[in-house]
Image: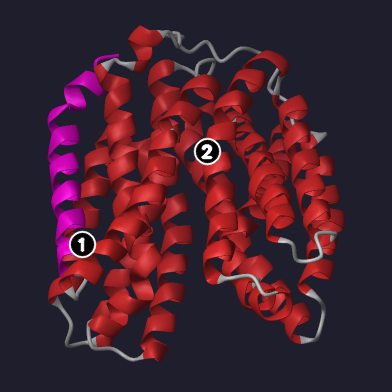
C-alpha cells in the first residue's frame, strides 16, 4: 500500500520537472540579448526538443516493456541532466544549445514522460483516468513553477547559462532520485493484451485514438501558439492578452485532473465529449468579442478541453488494449500530438498572414473538432465492444 503512494509522488515530481520545457520562452529574451541568438534559432531549439520528445517516447516505450520503469526513467533523467549541463557550457552557441536541450534534454523528456503514466495506472487500476490526470497536471504545472523561479533569478542578474547549470544539478538530481523508486506492482493486472502488431496499429480502435488526439491537440496548439494575437485581434488589450494566456494555462491544468475523473466515470464517451465541447467553446470565443470577462471564461474552458487530450487517450488505450501494450502503443498514438505541434501553430500563423485575420484558422479548427467529435461519437460501438 505504501509503495503506490511513493510511486505516485515520484511520478508527479518527474512530470513536474519535465514539464518545465514549456517555460522555454522565459529564456528566449536572455539568449537573444546576451548571446545574439535569433528568435528563429530559439524557436528551433524548442521545436526540436518537442519533436525529439515525441519520437523518443516510442523507443522508451519498448525499453519500458522489457526493462521496467526504473531503468527507463533513469535513462531519461541522465539524458535530461546531461542535456542542460551541455547547454550551460555552450557559451551561447546555437548548435551546442540545440544538441544539449533539443536532442539530449528532449530525449530525456520522452524517456521520462511515459513511465509515471504506466506505473500510476498499474498501481491504481480502478482510477486510471484520475491518476493519469494528476500526473500530467504536474507536467502542465511544471512550466508555471519553472517560469516563476527562472524569472526571479534571471531578473536578479543570474546568467541564463548558469541557470541551465542549476537545472541540471537540482531538478536533474531529483529526477534521478525519483526514477530510482519507480516500480510496478508485483501482481499482474490481468487485463487483456491485444498485442502491438501491424493489425493492431491499423485497427479502427487505435486509429480513432490517433485521429482524436491529433485533432484535439492541433486545435489546442494552434490556439496556444497564437493566443495573444488572437486576443488582440478580437479587440482586447495586451493586458487582457497576457491574462488570457494565464487563464488558458489554469484551465489546462484543471482540465487534466477533471477529465481523468470523468474518464473513470464515462470511459470512451469522454472522447467525443471533449472534442465537441472544444468546438463549442472555440466558436463562442470567436463570436463573443464584446465582453472581456466572457472571453476569459471561454479561454479557460478551451484550456480545460485541451488538457483532456493528455489524459483521455492514455487512459483509453490502457483500458482497451491492456496495460502490457500501453508502453508500446501510447507513444505511437502520441505522435499525433507531435504532428499537431508541427502543423497547428504554423498553419494558424500562415492563414493569418494570408487572410489578415485568424478567422479562417479558427473556423478550420472548429470544423475539424466538430467532424472528429461526430466520427468518434458514431464509432463508440467500436471502442466499447470489449
The residue beneath circle 2 is 54
**278 or 221, nearer to the observer:** 221
Circles 2, 1 touching at the beta carbon (< 8 Å): no
Relative image position of residue 348 (x, y in whole percent): 28, 61
Real-space Cα separation, disc 2 to disc 1, in angstroms: 25 Å
Image disc number at residue 361: 1
Determine crowd level at label 2: few under 14, some 14-19, many 20+ residues with C-alpha closer than 10 A. Answer: many
Above or below, 67 against 334 in this view is above
Query: Which type of secondary structure does the marked residue at label 1 adopt?
Result: helix
**260 or 111, nearer to the observer:** 111
Above or below, 142 against 238 in this view is above
Q: Give the range drawn in magenta.
A: 359-386
The quarter of the image holding the N terminus is top right
Magenta span: predominant SS is helix
Q: In terms of image quadrants, where is residue 46?
A: bottom right
Residue visible at 75% across and 46% down in the picture: 80
Relative image position of residue 340 (x, y in whole percent): 36, 46
Left or right relative to 79: residue 328: left
Relative image position of residue 239 (x, y in whole percent): 41, 90
Q: In terms of image quadrants, where is residue 312?
A: top left
Above or below, 57 against 144 in this view is above
The quarter of the image holding the C terminus is top left
Above or below, 379 against 44 in this view is above
Amino acid at each position: 500500500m505504501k509503495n503506490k503512494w511513493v510511486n505516485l509522488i515520484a511520478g508527479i515530481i518527474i512530470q513536474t520537472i519535465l514539464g518545465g520545457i514549456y517555460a522555454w520562452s522565459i529564456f528566449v529574451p536572455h539568449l537573444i540579448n546576451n548571446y545574439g541568438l535569433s528568435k528563429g534559432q530559439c524557436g528551433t531549439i524548442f521545436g526540436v526538443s518537442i519533436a525529439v520528445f515525441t519520437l523518443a517516447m516510442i523507443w522508451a516505450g519498448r525499453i519500458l516493456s522489457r526493462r521496467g520503469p526504473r531503468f527507463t526513467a533513469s535513462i531519461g533523467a541522465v539524458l535530461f541532466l546531461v542535456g542542460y549541463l551541455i547547454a550551460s557550457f555552450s557559451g551561447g552557441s546555437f548548435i551546442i544549445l540545440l544538441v544539449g536541450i533539443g536532442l539530449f534534454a528532449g530525449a530525456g523528456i520522452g524517456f521520462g514522460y511515459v513511465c509515471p503514466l504506466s506505473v500510476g495506472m498499474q498501481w491504481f487500476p480502478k482510477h486510471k483516468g484520475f491518476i493519469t490526470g494528476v500526473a500530467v497536471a504536474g507536467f502542465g504545472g511544471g512550466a508555471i513553477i519553472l517560469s516563476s523561479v527562472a524569472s526571479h533569478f534571471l531578473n536578479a542578474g543570474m546568467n541564463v547559462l548558469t541557470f541551465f547549470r542549476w537545472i541540471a544539478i537540482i531538478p536533474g538530481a531529483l529526477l534521478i532520485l525519483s526514477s530510482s523508486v519507480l516500480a510496478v506492482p508485483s501482481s499482474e493486472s490481468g487485463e487483456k493484451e491485444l498485442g502491438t502488431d501491424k493489425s493492431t496499429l491499423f485497427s479502427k480502435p487505435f486509429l480513432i485514438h490517433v485521429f482524436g488526439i491529433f485533432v484535439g491537440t492541433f486545435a489546442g496548439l494552434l490556439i496556444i501558439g497564437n493566443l495573444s494575437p488572437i486576443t488582440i485581434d478580437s479587440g482586447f488589450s495586451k493586458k487582457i492578452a497576457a491574462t488570457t494566456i494565464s487563464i488558458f494555462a489554469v484551465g489546462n491544468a484543471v482540465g487534466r485532473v477533471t477529465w481523468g475523473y470523468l474518464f473513470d466515470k464515462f470511459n470512451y464517451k469522454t472522447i467525443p465529449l471533449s472534442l465537441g465541447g472544444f468546438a463549442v467553446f472555440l466558436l463562442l470565443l470567436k463570436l463573443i468579442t464584446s465582453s472581456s470577462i466572457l472571453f476569459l471564461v471561454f479561454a479557460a474552458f478551451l484550456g480545460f478541453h485541451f488538457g483532456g487530450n493528455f489524459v483521455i487517450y492514455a487512459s483509453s488505450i490502457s483500458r482497451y488494449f491492456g496495460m502490457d501494450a500501453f508502453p508500446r502503443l501510447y507513444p505511437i498514438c502520441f505522435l499525433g500530438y507531435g504532428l499537431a505541434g508541427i502543423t497547428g501553430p504554423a498553419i494558424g500563423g500562415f492563414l493569418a498572414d494570408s487572410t489578415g485575420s485568424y478567422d479562417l484558422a479558427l473556423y478550420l479548427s472548429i470544423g475539424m473538432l466538430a467532424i472528429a467529435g461526430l466520427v468518434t461519437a458514431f464509432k463508440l460501438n467500436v471502442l466499447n465492444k470489449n
